[in-house]
Every structure is written in C-alpha cells, then in structure tokens.
Amino acid sequence: PKDAQRRGSQLLRILALEETLRTLQLRRVDLLHLNCEGCEYELLSSLTARSALAQRFGVVQFGTHNYPGDGVRTIVPQYCAIRRALSRTHALQWGTPFVWERWTRRRECLAASDCGTSPSRRAGPGAHSSRTRSKAATH
C-alpha cells in the first residue's frame, strides 16, 4: 500500500450494486450509465437478476463489447439473456447491439413490486416500436 501511494495510486473499495445503493441510502436512481470496458456483463447480470433491483433505475444506459476471443460462445448468449431480463422492467429506447443501448423503466414498473411477472406486462423484442426495431437486434 505504501508503494502504491508513493506512485500516486489509490486503493479502492469495490462494492456490489445493491450495497452501494444501501450505503448511499438511494431508493431510486434516475440514470445508471455504464462504460466499464468489459465488466458490464457481470454488472448487468446482477442488475437484471432481480426485477426489484432493476426497477430502482429510471434509465439504464450502457456500452457493451464483443471480444473476438469469447464472442459467440460466451458473450453473445450472456448479452441476449441480459436484454431479455431487462425487457421485463424496461423498454429499449434506442441502441445498437454491442455498442450502446438506452433502456427506460416501464410505466407499470414505477410502483409495481411484481413488474414483469405477468404475461400482460412482459414485453419481448416484438413490443418495441418500428423505429427501435430497425436500430437494434432482436434476441
């Protein structure tokens, strides 16, 4: 640690997303913007694992990366699973696959604790507007 401080480096404490919200006492966040050069899959997977956590964010905007070494075998299926899960609580506003996407919380998710669990609230790729469909891949 002392050597790191001498070179101008700092030690950081990394917190899970839920722990960060709890520590900062945040019930809602207007915008979650992610550009973390590769860690987005892990973070988005944890965000979408529980609808209650995802609902706390009004807008989720992120860049994704498709690394050639992992590509088809690992990244693409994980990316598609994240998009399917996020579509339960948010609607794709705009995006280009493996570049940038912006998802906005669905109106019914503002107060609903079971957002995305009933078939009438579940939206798949076909539920997006024609403008959005032309810009984003469907998974």
Image (cartoon, grey):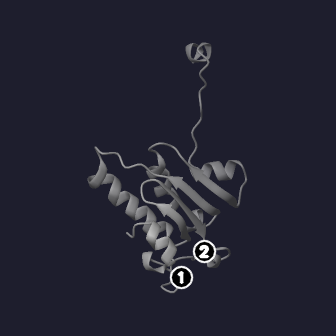
The residue at the point 51 percent across, 83 percent down is 118
Horizontal and vertical percent position of residue 27 = 71, 60
Q: Identify whether 133 is placed above or below 43.
A: below
Residue 87 left/right relative to 29? left
- In front of the other: 13 or 133: 133
Q: Secondary structure at mark 1?
A: loop
Q: For the residue marked with disc 1, what is the amino acid?
A: Arg
Q: Identify whether 111 is placed above or below 62.
A: below
The residue at the point 66 percent across, 52 percent down is 21
The residue at the point 64 percent across, 63 percent down is 56
Q: Identify whether 79 is placed above or below 121.
A: above
Horizontal and vertical percent position of residue 32 = 62, 55
In contact (CB < 8 Å): disc 1 and disc 2: yes
Horizontal and vertical percent position of residue 17 = 58, 51
Q: Which residue sits furthest bottom?
A: 120
Label 2, residues with CA under 10 Å away: few <14, some 14-19, many ≥20: many
Residue 51 left/right relative to 69? right
The residue at the point 43 percent across, 79 percent down is 126
Label 1, residues with CA under 10 Å away: few <14, some 14-19, many ≥20: some
Disc 1: which residue: 121
Residue 48 left/right relative to 75? right
Disc 2: which residue: 106
Q: For the residue marked with disc 2, what is the amino acid?
A: Arg
Viewport quadrant of the N terminus: top right
**Corner quadrant of residue 59:** bottom right
**Number of marks in the image?**
2
- In front of the other: 71 or 99: 99
Alpha carbons under labels 1 and 2: distance apart: 9 Å
Task: Decide if residue 62 is in sight here.
Answer: yes
Horizontal and vertical percent position of residue 98 = 42, 54
Q: Secondary structure at mark 2?
A: loop
Task: Decide if residue 49 is in sight here.
Answer: no
